Amino acid sequence: MTEALTVTYLGGPTALLELAGVRLLTDPTFDPPGEYPIGARKLVKTGSPGLDPEEVGLVDAVLLSHDQHPDNLDREGRTWLARQPLALSTAAARERLGDPVRALAPWETTEVARPDGGTLTVTAVPAQHGPDGSEPLTGPVLGFVLSGEGLPTVYVSGDNSSLDVVRSIAGRFPSVDVAVLFAGAAQTPVVPGAHLTLSSQDAAAAAELLGAGTVVPVHFEQWAHFTEGRDTLAPAFDKRGLGERLRLLPPGGRTVIQP
């Protein structure tokens, strides 16, 4: 029988994933609501995390899609990250943050030990944080795929807005059980009028491309630069006949997903 995945959604891009005894946290954000500068601009946080750093404690690895934006790694998140044994992220994040960050290139893999003596394989996968050509403005980003013997295959998109990227991942991982999709159709003045993350419609399309049995959206609320949210996700999935696959989780709630 395939192991269950337990997801605790904290809000924003942050979720605690527990799989075969391995604990992983995506994009640590623990700061309270307020204004957070990014260069000459600012991002506005509107909600509080579902758990505080002490409640999360130590994890086996952090899946850090990127470090350059405060809605993906904030001040308290950085303090918490420094206490962790391992974080997987981009080469740019490794250069800026140092330990415990380990740089991975797209399609590179690493293994995390499981308490049962097996291993959890983490594959870094591409992500595109905006339309074609936007990387010099938004910076490099990674997604991740989790896999292993007796485990569900779990895709964590990171801040990706490209369905072409999703197609490339589906081509390498034809059986995705759970997709953790960063949604919200984020928009900021850095790329005017463009989505920097998946829209609700594109999240549903991504789920279809991946053949994902369960989809857990994250990063679609608690920040003012999201243009879509909880109220647009269900209709978009229903329109494609995928409503039963969608799991909209409450912040702070612990949910067991049995593929």
Image (cartoon, rainbow, N blue to C red):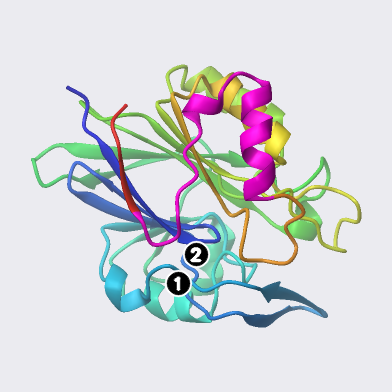
Q: Which residue is mark 2?
A: 94
Residue visible at 73% across and 49% down in the picture? 228
Q: Position of residue 79 (x, y in %)?
A: 42, 81
Asked if 178 appears above or below 84 in the picture, the reply is above
Report whether 2 appears left or right of 212: left
The residue segment tinted magenta is 229-253
Give the residue type at disc 1: Gly
SS state under label 1: loop
Q: Position of residue 229 (x, y in %)?
A: 67, 50
Q: Is residue 245 magenta?
A: yes
Instruction: State if disc 2 and disc 1 touch (CB < 8 Å).
Output: yes
SS state under label 2: helix
Residue visible at 59% across and 62% down in the picture? 92
Which of these two is toward me, 91 or 44?
Answer: 44
Asked if 136 appears above or below 146 in the picture, the reply is below
Report the Cα–Cα distance between label 1 and label 2: 5 Å
Picture quarter containing residue 19?
Answer: top left
Residue 148 in sight here: yes
Give the label on residue 22, or none.
none
